[in-house]
Image (tube, rainbow, N blue to C red):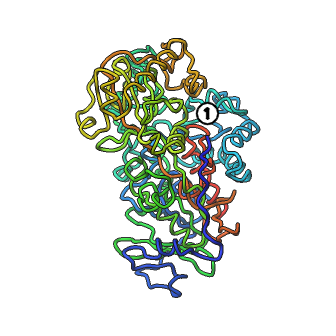
C-alpha cells in the first residue's frame, strides 16, 4: 500500500537552502562548516589519502569496501560507532535478491522477467525503472561476489512468501535468503567489536530467521518441537567444536568483516563523519574525527556513503515525517542520526522519500521497542484503534499496517497508539517476544503502560480508554469470522503471505481464532521501524544527484543513506539489506 504523503521537496539546484544551512552548517559543536560556505579550506591534523573512502560499516558499506578492494583499489571504512555492523548486525538479515544463485540452485522458478514484473508492480513509478533494473541486474552478481570473496554463505528461506505473492511475478514460496552459520572465532580479537543483535539468541541454541515461525509454535505443532530440537543440536555441536556460532545479522556482519580483513581493508571505529570535502564541485574526501582530532581523508576516486538513516535524529524526524514520531520507537542502530545524509545535502544532493521508513507495528517496552512480526499474525488476536474498532488486516506486511495507522489517524478517530488484543488461549499456545507460553509477562510491561490485563473485555476497554461496547462488538464480530474462516472486513488469511506466521493446526483459517478465554491482554502499538528509508537521490549507478538531475562527481550512496529503491513499499523479507548490499556493490564497481 503506497503512502499518499508527497515526498519532501528536494533542495534547489542552485545551492544549499536556508533550512539546510541553518540545520547543518555547524557541526561538531559549531567548529566546522563546509568549505564552500567558509570560502576557505580549514587546516587538519593529518593528511591521509586512499582511492576510496567508505562511510559506514553496515551491509552497504562493507559490501562496497570489499568490492572496491577486490578491484585493486586502496580503501578505508570509517565508522562512527565503537562497533561494526550497524543495523544489519542487529537484524534477522533476510536478503531479497531475485534470481540469485542460491535460490536458483534450490529450484525456485524465478526469472528476470518475473522479478521485473513483480518489482514494478510493487514499487510503481515512485522509483525510475532504470534504478529498479539496476538492482535486479546487479543483485545476483553481488550475491555471487560476496560468496566468493568472504566466508558468507546463504540459505533459502523456503516458504517465506514475497509480501504480495498474488501480484504478477510474485513468489508464494519466497525469494528471500539468509546467512548461514559461521564461527565467530574467524574474526579473532575483532569479534569483540561486532554490534550485538537486537534480540540475543538463547544460550546453547543456533537459530536461523526461518526457524522463528516454528519456535513460536513449539507447544502446539510437532514441527515446532522438531525445529527446537534442531536448534539445540546445532548449538551443542558448535560447543563441542569449540566454536562461537553466529547466524542472522551477526553472521552477515562478521562474514563481511572477515572478507575485509582478508583484503587488508582497515575499518576505523569511533571515527564519525563531520563533512564531505568538496573541491571544484567534486567530492574529494571526508573530514572525520579520529582519535579526537579533525582529520581529512582524501579520496582519489570518490566517497561511498553507507552511513544509515536518520531514525535517531529527533530534529530530522520532526522536520520530514508525520506526527506523532520520535526516536524511541525505532530498532535501528543508535548511531544512525543522518550524518551522511546531511553532509550529502550540504554538498548539493537532492533528497527522496524522507517522509517514509521501514515501518512496523511496535510495542514501546520499557527497555526498548519490540517490533511485532508473528504476534499480530497468530490466531487469537486483533488490532483496534482508539475507538475499539479493527482497521486493518493484522497479518498484512508490517510497513502497510503503519501506513494505515498514519493515514487514518485523526483527533476524532485516533489510530496512534493502536492496541493489540489477545486472550489467555493465545498466551497458552504461543511465544510472545521471548516470553514462553504460560509464563507471566514482566511487571515492568504493565508498570510502563505498554501492556494491560483484565478479566473481561469491558474492563480491558476501560483500562486502555476505548469504548467498551464497541470493543465488545468488535470481538464478537471477529469471533464470527474465526468460526467461518473468512474475514470479510479485512481479508486476513487470504494471502499466502498472511499465513506464514500463522498456526497451521487452526482450522478453517490458520490466521483466525476467537478471543474467548479470560484474562484478556492489550498491548500498546506505535509506529516502529527498522530504520528510515529516505536519503540522497541516486541514479542506477548509485551516483548522488542534485535536484536538477546532474551528478555530483565523486559521491555515491547506498543503503538507508539513499532513497530506497523500494519506494514507499516493501517487496519481501530483506528488501532493506538486499538493495543496500547491491548498490554498495554497484557504487564500488562504478567509482
For this orientation, the residue located farthest to the right is 113
For this orientation, the residue located farthest to the bottom is 40
Whether 555 is drawn above or below 481: the answer is below
Residue 404 located left or right of residue 164: left
Q: Position of residue 378 (x, y in %)?
A: 46, 24
Query: Which residue is tagged 1?
Result: 162
Q: Residue at x 40, y 81 (%)?
A: 45
Q: Residue at x 57, y 17 (%)?
A: 486
Whether 454 is drawn above or below 296: the answer is above
Whether 221 is drawn above or below 409: the answer is above
Q: Position of residue 56 (x, y in %)?
A: 48, 59
Residue 545 located left or right of residue 441: right
| Quarter of the picture holding the C terminus | bottom right
Residue 194 located left or right of residue 146: left
Q: Name which quarter of the figure residue 385 lies in.
A: top left
Tell which of 341 and 192 is nearer to you: 341
| Quarter of the picture holding the N terminus | top right
Residue 514 visible in the current orientation: yes
Q: Residues within 10 Å of mark 1 (few under 14, many from 20)?
A: many
Amino acid at each position: 500500500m503506497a503512502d499518499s504523503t508527497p515526498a519532501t521537496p528536494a533542495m534547489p539546484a542552485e545551492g544549499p537552502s536556508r533550512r539546510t544551512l541553518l540545520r547543518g552548517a555547524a557541526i561538531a559543536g559549531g567548529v566546522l562548516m563546509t568549505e564552500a560556505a567558509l570560502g576557505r579550506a580549514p587546516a587538519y591534523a593529518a593528511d591521509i589519502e586512499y582511492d576510496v573512502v567508505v562511510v559506514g560499516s553496515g551491509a552497504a558499506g562493507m559490501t562496497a569496501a570489499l568490492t572496491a578492494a577486490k578491484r585493486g583499489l586502496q580503501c578505508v571504512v570509517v565508522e562512527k560507532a565503537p562497533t561494526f555492523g550497524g543495523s544489519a548486525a542487529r537484524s534477522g538479515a533476510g536478503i531479497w535478491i531475485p534470481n540469485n544463485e542460491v535460490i536458483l540452485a534450490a529450484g525456485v522458478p524465478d526469472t528476470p522477467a518475473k522479478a521485473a514484473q513483480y518489482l514494478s508492480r510493487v514499487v510503481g513509478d515512485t522509483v525510475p525503472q532504470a534504478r529498479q533494473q539496476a538492482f535486479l541486474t546487479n543483485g545476483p552478481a553481488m550475491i555471487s561476489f560476496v560468496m566468493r570473496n568472504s566466508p558468507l554463505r546463504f540459505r533459502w528461506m523456503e516458504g517465506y512468501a514475497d509480501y504480495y505473492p498474488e501480484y504478477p511475478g510474485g513468489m508464494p514460496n519466497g525469494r528471500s535468503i539468509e546467512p548461514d552459520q559461521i564461527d565467530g572465532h574467524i574474526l579473532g580479537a575483532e569479534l569483540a567489536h561486532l554490534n550485538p543483535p537486537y534480540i540475543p539468541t538463547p544460550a546453547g541454541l543456533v537459530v536461523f530467521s526461518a526457524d522463528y515461525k516454528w519456535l513460536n509454535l513449539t507447544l502446539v505443532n510437532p514441527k515446532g518441537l522438531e525445529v527446537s530440537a534442531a536448534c539445540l543440536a546445532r548449538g551443542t555441536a558448535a560447543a563441542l567444536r569449540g566454536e562461537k556460532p553466529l547466524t542472522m545479522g551477526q553472521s552477515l556482519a562478521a562474514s563481511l568483516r572477515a572478507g575485509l580483513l582478508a583484503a587488508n581493508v582497515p575499518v576505523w571505529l569511533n571515527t564519525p563523519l563531520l563533512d564531505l570535502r568538496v573541491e571544484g564541485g567534486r567530492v574529494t574526501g571526508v573530514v572525520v574525527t579520529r582519535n579526537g582530532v579533525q582529520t581529512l581523508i582524501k579520496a582519489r576516486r570518490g566517497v561511498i556513503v553507507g552511513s544509515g538513516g536518520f531514525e535517531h535524529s529527533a530534529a530530522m524526524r520532526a522536520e520530514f515525517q508525520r506526527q506523532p514520531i520520535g526516536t524511541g520507537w525505532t530498532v535501528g542502530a543508535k548511531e544512525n542520526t543522518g550524518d551522511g545524509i546531511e553532509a550529502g545535502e550540504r554538498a548539493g544532493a537532492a533528497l527522496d522519500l524522507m517522509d517514509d521508513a521501514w515501518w512496523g507495528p511496535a510495542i514501546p517496552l520499557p527497555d526498548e521497542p519490540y517490533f511485532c512480526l508473528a504476534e499480530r499474525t497468530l490466531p487469537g488476536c486483533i488490532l483496534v484503534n482508539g475507538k475499539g474498532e479493527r482497521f486493518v488486516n493484522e497479518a498484512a506486511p508490517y510497513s502497510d499496517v503503519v501506513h494505515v495507522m498514519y493515514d487514518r489517524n485523526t483527533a476524532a478517530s485516533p489510530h496512534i497508539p493502536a492496541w493489540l488484543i489477545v486472550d489467555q488461549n493465545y498466551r497458552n499456545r504461543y511465544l510472545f517476544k521471548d516470553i514462553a507460553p504460560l509464563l507471566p509477562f514482566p511487571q515492568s510491561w504493565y508498570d510502563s503502560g505498554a501492556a494491560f490485563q483484565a478479566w473481561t473485555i469491558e474492563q480491558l476497554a476501560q483500562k486502555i480508554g476505548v469504548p467498551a461496547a464497541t470493543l465488545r462488538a468488535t470481538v464478537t464480530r471477529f469471533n464470527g469470522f474465526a468460526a467461518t474462516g473468512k474475514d470479510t472486513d479485512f481479508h486476513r488469511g487470504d494471502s499466502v503471505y498472511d499465513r506464514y506466521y500463522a498456526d497451521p493446526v487452526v482450522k478453517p483459517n490458520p490466521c483466525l481464532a476467537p478471543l474467548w478465554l479470560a484474562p484478556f491482554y492489550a498491548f500498546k502499538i506505535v509506529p516502529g521501524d527498522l530504520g528510515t528509508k529516505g536519503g540522497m537521490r541516486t541514479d542506477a549507478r548509485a551516483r548522488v544527484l542534485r535536484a536538477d538531475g546532474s551528478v555530483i562527481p565523486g559521491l555515491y550512496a547506498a543503503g538507508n543513506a539513499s532513497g530506497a529503491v523500494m519506494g514507499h513499499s516493501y517487496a519481501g523479507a530483506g528488501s532493506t539489506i538486499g538493495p543496500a548490499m547491491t548498490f554498495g556493490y554497484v557504487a564500488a564497481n562504478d567509482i
